Amino acid sequence: MNNISSLVAQQPSAQQPQQEGSAGGADMASLSSLVQRAPGAPAGGGPAAQPPAPDHAQTVAAITHLGEFQRRFRALQAIPDIGKASIRGEVIDMMADVMGDGLVTLPQVMSQLKTFPSDPLAQKQWVDKHYQNTAQALQTILAQHAQAFPRTGLEPVPPMTGKGGVAQNHATMMGALVDHYKSRTRH
């Protein structure tokens, strides 16, 4: 399922993407799919007995990363003509912005733009689906963290603004988070 969730959740990497089966994605496995495949991941939204919880810093990195994509998908959904006229230009602009902010690489953007349909109604469905996938990944990560670390609360996540708005260690934290879930899917 090659979709924007894999783009949303991937740490920027200098490596070229490689297709793998029907999941299709970059060399770095998508955080969204890793979260869903991890042993102990909530099935049907319910909590699991022992979730593979990310630590606090990884959770903050995931919230920052996925939250920024969710905000940008919401902006695309608010376009008055979505579903009636092509929004390809707006999607390309959004992808360029997130790439400029250091959230994704050019190969990841190109891989995802290949999946963007030309039909305006299908474009609306594409944006809606990716917004839902991003929201689900956020919910899952937060649920796993909350279950593993009860009563720790959440720190406010600053919005990502301007060029290079990503914290200096964001890419490192996203890499650690992906590695965290990768290690749990190998068993």
Image (tube, rainbow, N blue to C red):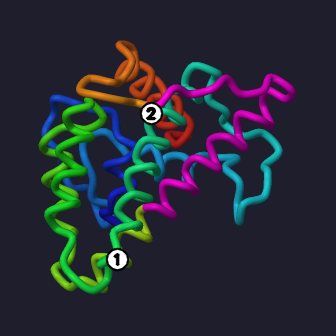
Horizontal side of 41 relative to 63 (left or right) equals: right
Q: Which residue is mark 2?
A: 178
Residue 64 spot, x, y in % from top left: 49, 33
Query: Please, what is the three-letter code of the amino acid marked with disc 2?
Result: Val
State which quadrant residue 51 falls in. top right
The residue mark sitting in front, 1 or 2, is: 1
Where residue 92 appears, x then y in whole percent? Answer: 16, 56
Which element is circle 2 on? Answer: helix
Left or right side of 142 for 131: left
Q: Tell which of 175 and 68 is nearer to you.
A: 68
Q: Residues within 10 Å of mark 2 (few under 14, many from 20)?
A: many
Q: Residue at x 23, y 26 (%)?
A: 163
Instruction: Specify the principal SS of the magenta part.
Output: helix
- Tag 1 residue: 124
Q: How many marks?
A: 2
Residue at image x 30%, y 63%? 2
Judge whether 39 appears above or below 59 on screen.
below
Q: Amino acid at mark 1?
A: Lys
Q: Quadrant of residue 151?
A: top right
